[in-house]
Image (cartoon, grey):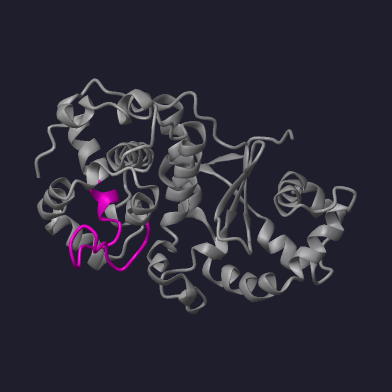
Amino acid sequence: MIVSVAFLSGCGGRPRMEINRLDLLAHDAARGRIGDEEVGKMSGGIRALMAVTGADTAQSEAEFLRQYGATEFSEVFAPEVELKFNQLDIQEQDLGEARQILSEELPELKFPSQVYGIVTPYRQSVMTVDSVMLLGLNHYLGADFEGYEAFGAERSRKTPERMAVEAVSALVMSRYPFESHGGEATLLSRMLYDGAVTAAVKRALPSKSVKALLGTDSAATEKMISEEREIWRSLAEKGLLFSTDVSVNSRLFMYAQSSDRIYPGCPGRAVAYTAMRIVESYMKNNPDAKLPDLLSPTFYNSAETLRMAAYNP
């Protein structure tokens, strides 16, 4: 799939990466309000969406879009998305800035040629097909949106400021996937990898808060910051750092009201915060370390990394 690059200049000179509004086009298509010219302009995004949904490739793009826009989930979420995101200037500037920064910091990381906003029925909010990225805008309507009740604690990550964070995270993890060297991965290895990904996102999006980076709410974020020492001590004393239990390790990273396995009342996602802090300490004590170094298996699988981080909250 060959598509053109769409970059614009943003306010105050910030670079900007356009998010093409395929969600609006689909909504209009269901009402017979678009023509072949509008469809042709977004052909790359439509084809990517057809690939994601497993649509019949023989179907015309216009007919697919009309049917997609008429689905129940589109009818429910499209008006809400349009109301919430009359414009996406901030998100477009975030993506443009991230692309500019990471083109130097992570030159092997390739940003998509085009980005399309969609309404999606899937839990996955960021999808890539060839050089096209699809962003499920209905995943970022705000933590208090009534339609997110079924997501429980995960609602905290469904905010507009998380859109660029999750897009960049997905690109970094796709280019630098976690690799375990021999045997089952320990929680510590997973934490170091997660912290390295967060470091890359933080470098790309320097204005993002800890809350935005981790996808936690204000109360949980403040609690993690104030109880950093206790969280670390409990992880170490309970031997959790070297746990190879996939189920336990996965649950510790999940969005939850609490991480009681660490200690009762410990905030959910505490290991993600600790991971971020360990990597920050490593970078402070090893200033020559570059992002590609941190995203290498030799970093997050090494027994020496924790010692070199000198993390001592």
Residue 217 seen:
yes
Q: Report the quarter where the N terminus lies.
A: top right
Task: Answer with left or right where residue 161 lies relative to residue 225.
Answer: right
Name the residue rendered at 50%, 32% in the picture.
Answer: 175
Relative to 278, is 103 on the left or the right?
right
Q: Is residue 269 magenta?
A: yes
In this view, the residue in front, 43 or 227, is: 227
> Residue 195: x percent and y percent?
31, 40
Q: Is residue 195 above or below residue 30?
A: above
Q: Main secondary structure of the magenta part?
A: loop
The image quarter in which residue 131 lies: top right
> Start and end of the magenta stretch?
254-274
Residue 63 placement, left or right of 103: right
Q: Quadrant of the C terminus?
A: top left
Residue sitting at x 44%, y 69%: 142
Q: Residue sitting at 21 percent across and 39 percent down?
A: 278
Q: Nearer the viewer, residue 271 or 51?
A: 271
The residue shown at (46%, 36%) is: 172
